[in-house]
């Protein structure tokens, strides 16, 4: 018999469906991890939640992250740096990463994501120190399984070190052959393309200034031969633009296009410094963007042209980016910051609070190519989160639940997070782990990483 969960008498169900529907006083039934009923008929289930004072939203989807950076957030020596010097400074710490630090940073970062309504995490892990072996993604998937979150990992990579004109130290780069061999192994071991899978894999060379053209081109060929997607950073800073112009005589997008990196199986993190013609090309090819507003603000990278992207039809998802350039893993905060940032920068042309919510749900699902996520409808995955309207800080905010997360925001943890019909956050606490114990173990792991000898 399929395990089932019923949300009973939902006050407001914000569906983010094709009709932008918001339903009131309905029941939502999940069976075997899939939504099988939404309506007013009485239903029964193995587990029942009284949602009569709650707003239910589709689970948020994080379209770009670096979980390992959770262990290097709020470090004073990098707080006022921009991207290139920030990276070069932190690489000296990151070259000490091992399976223990990756496991606990993943547990910490994904735990925070779950507590703030995120049900699917895309992580871009690209630092593979020579001493760490080939178990780092194993550690990430183990942490995801323990928490109960959907994990979309990328096998990132770097092959252009300082001695070759790149930014990373020699100890964290690998040869093209080593990278491609491990990429194939990871895809074969973990990628599950089934509609409601809990784990998927994409290939993700780090950036134009830390990988060679050969790696980019060969990664694209391998990804397409194996039916997986492609991801990297692009157009994040003017320094990157100057790098590709000086080294290749091309702007970043032209360079990537010359290597086969355009199409509906590709999405880029950031996409700040595209010109109008490039935005049109992204729209025409359905090449996606992961928008990272908090990170872009902290590193003084700039403001992505999100209103224009949305008008043109560029697929855009929302993301927190690495914790070291965000200092948190909270997509609820990202929704509110994105709303306010674009209101400030674009006035009435800016996306509404509800449109930012859709960016974090439907938009992120689109850039990840995951059709069964991002909305609440029969046949979709049973991924959602609940916020009680009885909170003091939400008094008066119930008149537009669709825009509530952007206009008011939710401070702190949500009441419930559900992934595949399984409650993973209840009354604001993680269900499957002891948060205090995890915090203690993670802090010990942080100390080992920061005190590790080079």
Image: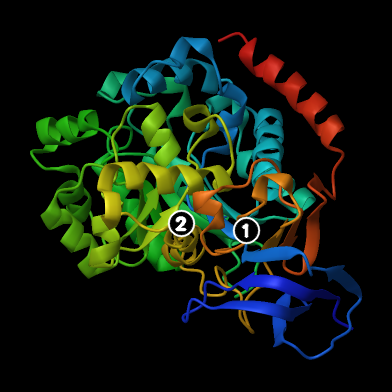
Nearer to us: label 2 or label 1: 2
Q: Determine which residue is flagged by label 1.
A: 190
Residue 176 placement: quadrant: top left
Instruction: Determine if residue 95 is in view.
Output: no
Taking 408 as reference, is 90 above or below it? Answer: above
Residue 147 x, y percent position in the rendering: 76, 50
Q: On the image, which quarter does residue 30 sit in?
A: bottom right
Query: For the view shown, which residue lies furthest in the left direction?
Result: 249
Residue 238 rendering spot, x and y as whole percentages: 20, 31
Secondary structure beneath disc 2? helix
| Residue for point 58% across, 34% down | 328
Quarter that holds the N terminus: bottom right
Is residue 375 shown left or right of residue 27? left
Residue 230 visible? The answer is: yes
Residue 129 or residue 100, whichever sits in front: 100
User: Residue lying farthest front?
Assistant: 396
Q: Name which residue lies at 52% across and 33% down.
A: 128
Q: How many residues crowd mark 1 within 10 Å: few (<14), some (14–19), many (20+)? A: some
Q: Establish if 371 lies above or below 135.
A: below
Question: Is residue 76 positioned above or below 53 on the image?
Answer: above
**Dot placed on the residue nearer the N-terminal end, 2 or 1:** 1
Q: Quadrant of residue 312?
A: bottom left
Give the colour scheme shown.
Answer: rainbow
Which residue does the numbered mark 2 point to in the structure image? Answer: 353
Q: Badge 2, how many Cα within 10 Å: few under 14, some, many 20+? A: many
């Amino acid at each position: 018999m399929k395990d089932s969960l019923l949300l009973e008498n939902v006050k407001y169900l914000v569906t983010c469906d094709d009709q932008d529907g918001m339903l009131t006083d309905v029941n939502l039934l999940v069976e075997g991890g899939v939504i099988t009923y939404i309506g007013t008929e009485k239903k029964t289930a193995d587990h029942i939640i009284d949602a009569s004072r709650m707003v239910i939203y589709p689970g948020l989807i994080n379209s770009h992250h670096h979980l390992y950076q959770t262990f290097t957030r709020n470090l004073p020596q990098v707080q006022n740096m921009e991207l290139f010097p920030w990276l070069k400074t932190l690489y000296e710490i990151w070259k000490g990463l091992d399976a223990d630090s990756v496991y606990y940073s993943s547990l910490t970062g994904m735990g925070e994501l779950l507590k703030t309504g995120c049900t699917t995490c895309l992580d871009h892990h690209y630092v593979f120190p020579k001493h760490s072996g080939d178990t780092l993604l194993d550690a990430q998937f183990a942490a995801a399984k323990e928490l109960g979150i959907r994990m979309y990992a990328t096998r990132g990579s770097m092959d252009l070190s300082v001695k070759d004109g790149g930014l990373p130290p020699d100890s964290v780069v690998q040869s093209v052959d080593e990278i491609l061999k491990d990429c194939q192994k990871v895809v074969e071991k973990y990628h599950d393309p089934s509609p409601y899978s809990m784990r998927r894999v994409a290939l993700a060379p780090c950036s134009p200034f830390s990988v060679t053209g050969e790696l980019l081109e060969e990664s694209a060929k391998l990804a397409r031969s194996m039916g997986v997607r492609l991801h990297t950073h692009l157009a994040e800073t003017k320094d990157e633009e100057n790098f590709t112009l000086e080294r290749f005589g091309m702007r970043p997008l032209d360079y990537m296009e010359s290597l086969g990196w355009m199409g509906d199986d590709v999405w880029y993190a950031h996409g700040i410094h595209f010109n109008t013609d490039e935005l049109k090309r992204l729209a025409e090819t359905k090449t996606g963007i992961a928008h990272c507003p908090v990170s872009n603000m902290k590193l003084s990278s700039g403001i992505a042209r999100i209103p224009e992207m949305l008008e043109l039809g560029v697929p855009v998802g929302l993301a927190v980016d690495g914790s070291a350039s965000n200092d948190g893993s909270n997509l609820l905060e990202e929704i509110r910051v994105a709303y306010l940032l674009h209101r400030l920068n674009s006035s009435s042309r800016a996306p509404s609070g509800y449109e930012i919510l859709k960016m974090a749900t439907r938009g992120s699902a689109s850039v990840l190519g995951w059709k069964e996520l991002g909305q609440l409808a029969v046949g979709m995955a049973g991924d959602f989160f609940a916020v009680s309207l009885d909170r003091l800080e939400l008094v008066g905010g119930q008149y537009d639940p669709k825009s509530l997360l952007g206009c008011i925001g939710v401070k702190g943890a949500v009441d419930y997070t559900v992934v595949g019909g399984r409650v993973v956050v209840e009354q604001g606490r993680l269900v499957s782990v002891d948060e205090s114990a995890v915090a203690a173990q993670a802090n010990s792991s942080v100390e080992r990483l920061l005190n590790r000898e080079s």
